[in-house]
Amino acid sequence: MSEFLGKIIDFFNSTNVPQQFRDTDLKALFTNPWFLVPFIAFICYNLYKQATNTLVMTALGFGLWVFSGSRYMEGLVVNGFLQLGKVLPVAGVFLGAIGIAIYFLFMRSD
């Protein structure tokens, strides 16, 4: 069994998708067919099912992932000191995302 899983893990690592997620390399990620084909299939399937909650949660997670790797977030801590002027917008983005998630998960029904 571990031999089978080892082959799957080796295949997944050979696609470089884990490294691209760590490096937030959007251009390379969206030109990699090993990521793009299943991602498009996932989006099309959810559009077909009209699963707006799933689509919104996917977009929210993807957007937060992109925002957390942005240059704005890199400048949040400079020389070991937190830049207080940048904290409020960051908190606003993440609190807004939590608010949207709560609305779609608990208050809105399909």
Image (spheres, rainbow, N blue to C red):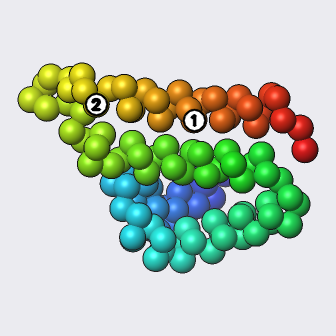
Q: CA distance from mark 2 to mark 1?
A: 17 Å
- Which quadrant is the C terminus positioned in? top right
- Three-letter residue code for mark 2: Lys
On the rendered structure, is 56 left or right of 76?
A: right
Q: Do the residues bearing badges 2 and 1 touch, measured as CB atoms within 8 Å?
A: no
In the rendered image, residue 95, in percent from the top left (x then y), is placed at: 53, 27
On the rendered structure, is 104 left or right of 93?
A: right
Few, some or many residues within 10 Å of mark 1 (<14, 14–19, 20+): some
Element type at marker 2?
helix
Query: Residue, x 39% and y 42% (percent of image)?
Result: 68
**In this picture, is 103 found above or below 25?**
above
Q: Which residue is mark 1?
A: 97
Q: 19 and 104: which one is in front?
A: 104
Query: Residue, x 57% and y 45% (percent of image)?
Result: 61
Name which quarter of the figure residue 87 lies in. Answer: top left
In the rendered image, residue 29, in percent from the top left (x then y), is placed at: 45, 67
Query: Residue, x 47% and y 35% (percent of image)?
Result: 93
Dot placed on the residue nearer the N-terminal end, 2 or 1: 2
- Three-letter residue code for mark 1: Ala
Numbered badge on residue 86: 2
